[in-house]
């Protein structure tokens, strides 16, 4: 993989981008996402977030290599994708309900750009300040547990499994909260998801899909920085 990693990664990304952009397959993707949101959320995050994880490995180690425990990690990404699909709807509908009851200020002009911008910002900020830290912490715990189980040491011997409680105890939580929560959420995720909720549904699907790669990249890169 070290020799052809870049070619393989770019080809997969290009194939996925073409699938989203070409009218015939784009309509199929949008239709499938609307009809089967959980299944598509699982598939999308399992593939794209894992691609982000491979890219993070390439950046940190300066070479392409297999991600230890790739299949269980893909499964975890898929499960998180299902949760994210649900939470997008929960927070969007919750903010809409609060606005309709006058609990959130939107500038006083229904349908105007300011109202749309504030609504998107409310959804993004509330979601990223409440749900995001919990889900990112859950990913860090499962990722640490999988790494301990599937990693190989310098002698080529398989790693020893650890319990979830042991995984929690070995994580650098200070670094996690300083970088992942303290920097990426306010500086990237809140602005990025504000843009997401401003977009028409057709483009929202594409933009959200691209963020799946960024999510895998950021969380994996942050973990490897502290390992």
Image (cartoon, rainbow, N blue to C red):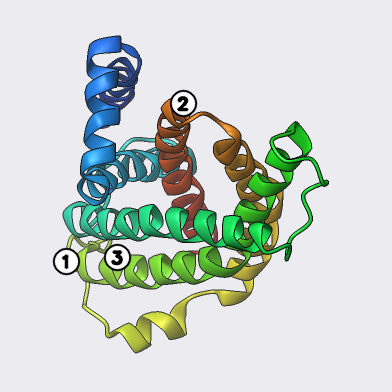
Question: Looking at the rendering, which quadrant does residue 150 occupy?
Answer: bottom left
Mark 3 or mark 1: which comes first in sequence?
3
Query: Residue 212, image x and y in percent?
Result: 41, 42
Eye-nearest disc, 3 or 2: 2
User: Real-space Cα distance between discs 3 and 2?
Assistant: 35 Å
Q: Is residue 227 above or below residue 14?
A: below
Residue nearer the viewer, 80 or 9: 80
Query: Which residue matches tag 1?
Result: 157
Q: Residue at x 21, y 62 (%)?
A: 155
Query: Residue 133, image x and y in percent?
Result: 55, 68
Q: Is residue 42 above or below residue 76?
A: above
**In the figure, is residue 12 to the left or right of 174?**
left
Residue nearer the viewer, 68 or 152: 68
For mark 2, give the secondary structure. helix
Q: Is residue 109 above or below residue 95?
A: above
Query: Residue 223, image x and y in percent?
Result: 48, 60
Question: Looking at the rendering, which quadrant does residue 18 occupy?
Answer: top left
Query: Which residue matches tag 2?
Result: 203
Tell me the number on the disc at residue 188. none
User: Real-space Cα distance between discs 2 and 1?
Assistant: 47 Å
Tell me the number on the disc at residue 147. 3
Which residue sits furthest right? 107
Q: Residue at x 30, y 11 (%)?
A: 22
Mark 3 and 2 residues: CB-CB less than 8 Å, in contact? no
């Amino acid at each position: 993989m070290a020799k052809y990693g870049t070619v393989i990664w770019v080809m997969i990304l290009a194939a996925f981008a073409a699938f989203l952009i070409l009218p015939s397959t784009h309509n199929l993707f949008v239709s499938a996402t609307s009809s089967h949101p959980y299944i598509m959320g699982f598939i999308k995050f399992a593939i794209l977030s894992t691609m982000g994880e491979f890219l993070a490995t390439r950046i940190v180690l300066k070479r392409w290599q297999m991600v230890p425990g790739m299949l269980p990690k893909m499964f975890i990404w898929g499960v998180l994708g299902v949760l994210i699909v649900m939470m997008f709807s929960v927070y969007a509908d919750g903010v809409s309900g609060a606005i309709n009851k006058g609990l959130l200020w939107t500038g006083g002009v229904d349908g105007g750009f300011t109202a749309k911008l504030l609504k998107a910002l409310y959804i993004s900020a509330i979601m990223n300040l409440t749900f995001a830290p919990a889900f990112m912490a859950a990913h860090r715990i499962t990722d640490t547990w999988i790494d301990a189980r599937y990693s190989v040491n310098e002698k080529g011997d398989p790693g020893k499994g650890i319990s979830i409680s042991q995984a929690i105890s070995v994580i650098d939580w200070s670094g996690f909260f300083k970088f992942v929560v303290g920097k990426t959420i306010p500086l990237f995720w809140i602005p990025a998801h504000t843009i997401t909720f401003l977009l028409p549904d057709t483009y929202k699907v594409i933009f959200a899909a691209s963020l799946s790669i960024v999510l895998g990249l950021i969380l994996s890169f942050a973990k490897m920085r502290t390992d």
